Structure formats: structure tokens, C-alpha cells
Image (spheres, rainbow, N blue to C red):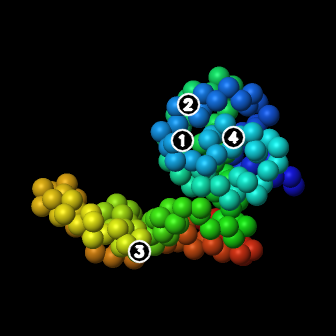
Amino acid sequence: MAFRQQIEAISGQNANLCYQCSKCSAGCPMAAWMDLKPAQIMHSIRLGREEAVLNSKSIWLCVGCETCSARCPQQVEPAAAMTAARALALQNGIQPGVKEIGLYYNGFISNMRLNGKIHDASVAGITQLLTGQLKDNLPLAWKLLVRGRVKPPPLPLGGGNFRRIYKRAMEKERGGEEVIG
């Protein structure tokens, strides 16, 4: 299956509907930091430029706010295409183009597996620690903790339902039987 067709199958979006008005790029709050703006990602998908899209920083910097989707006169959802591109990149063994994002995603999943829910401060703290930025942000973290804006991390509860769901998803990905229930 061609790259464009893979993205469309995962995202449910028709990349050919995009006529490059660039309203998505104009409204994107992360566009200033992207190597390919949302309109360029959509154009690259249409052209089948798999390597350019999957190796871009843009797909990892997309925060999924869907401002791009709200501004599109064609009802195309570039945010969904970005999510699909991230999934394909990971499936193809391509590491995130932004180191912090990869560390954050791994911390997010580890936190879910451990606690069954997300403790934002733990995920952010681990990401900061692994990127060497924790020392710079400790004063702010302390202020937030003292003022009750950040809750202490929960005791590990074993992950509950999430652990079972995650295990099933990993088994399915490895070719195991799909378990329903």
C-alpha cells in the first residue's frame, strides 16, 4: 500500500482534498518550531514523500489541538494525519525527531502501566531529568508543589485495566490472537 493510502487508512482523511490554502499552518501554535508546516505535511503526504514526513520534527511537535482542522475549508484534519504519521514512524522503527518527545511518550506509557492513570508531574519530571533540564526547573516545581498546584505522585497500583488493555494491544501487534472482553 502506498504511503498516502496508509496515512488515509489510519487517519480517515483524504489528503487530495487539501488545496494548499495554508490556513492550517497560519493557525498552528507550533508552526514556528516545525520543519514542515501542516500544509507542507499534507502536500508531502499527497506526493508520497514518506521519508520526509516520517523523519520530520513536525509530526512529533503537533500537540493535537486541532486548530488546523477547525480552520480547514475542506474539512481535512491535518492533526489526524500527523497522528497517523507518528504511528507509521514508530511502526517503521523511526525514533521521534525531537528527543524530549520520545522520552515524554515513553514516560507517559510507563506511568500509565505503573499507576493505571497519568500523573502529569511525574511524566514531566522524568522527561526533564532524562533531558538534563530538571535542575533549571526545580525552583518552579517546588513552588507549584508548596502551593498545592501539583499533587504528589500516587502509590503504584499496578495499572488496573490499562495494563490489561496495553498487554492485549502488544499481543495483537506481535501477531497474537485478538482477545475480546
Q: Which kind of residue does numbered mark 3 sit on?
A: Leu
Mark 1 in CB contact with mark 2 (< 8 angstroms): yes
If you read the primary sequence from the N terminus, does the residue marked by circle 2 or circle 3 appear first?
Answer: 2
For the point 66% across and 75% down, the residue is 171
For the point 59% across and 32% down, the residue is 24
Give how far apart the Cα atoms at labels 2 and 4 are.
12 Å
Instruction: Determine which residue is flagged by label 3.
Output: 130
Q: Residues within 10 Å of mark 3 (few under 14, many from 20)?
A: few
Q: Which kind of residue does numbered mark 1 sit on?
A: Ala
Q: Secondary structure at mark 4?
A: helix
Q: Is residue 37 above or below residue 154?
A: above
Q: Please tell me which residue lies in front, 4 or 171.
A: 4
Instruction: Determine which residue is flagged by label 2.
Output: 26
If you read the primary sequence from the N terminus, does the residue marked by circle 1 or circle 2 appear first?
Answer: 2
For the point 53% across and 51% down, the residue is 61
Q: Which kind of residue does numbered mark 2 sit on?
A: Ala
If you read the primary sequence from the N terminus, does the residue marked by circle 3 or circle 4 appear first?
Answer: 4
Asked whether, in this view, residue 87 is left or right of residue 102, the answer is right
Give how far apart the Cα atoms at labels 1 and 4 are.
11 Å
Q: Secondary structure at mark 1?
A: helix
Residue 47 position in % (x across, y down):
82, 43
Asked whether, in this view, residue 132 is left or right of residue 9, the answer is left
Instruction: Determine which residue is flagged by label 1.
Output: 31
Q: Which kind of residue does numbered mark 4 sit on?
A: Gln
| Badge number at residue 107 | none
If you read the primary sequence from the N terminus, does the residue marked by circle 1 or circle 4 appear first?
Answer: 1
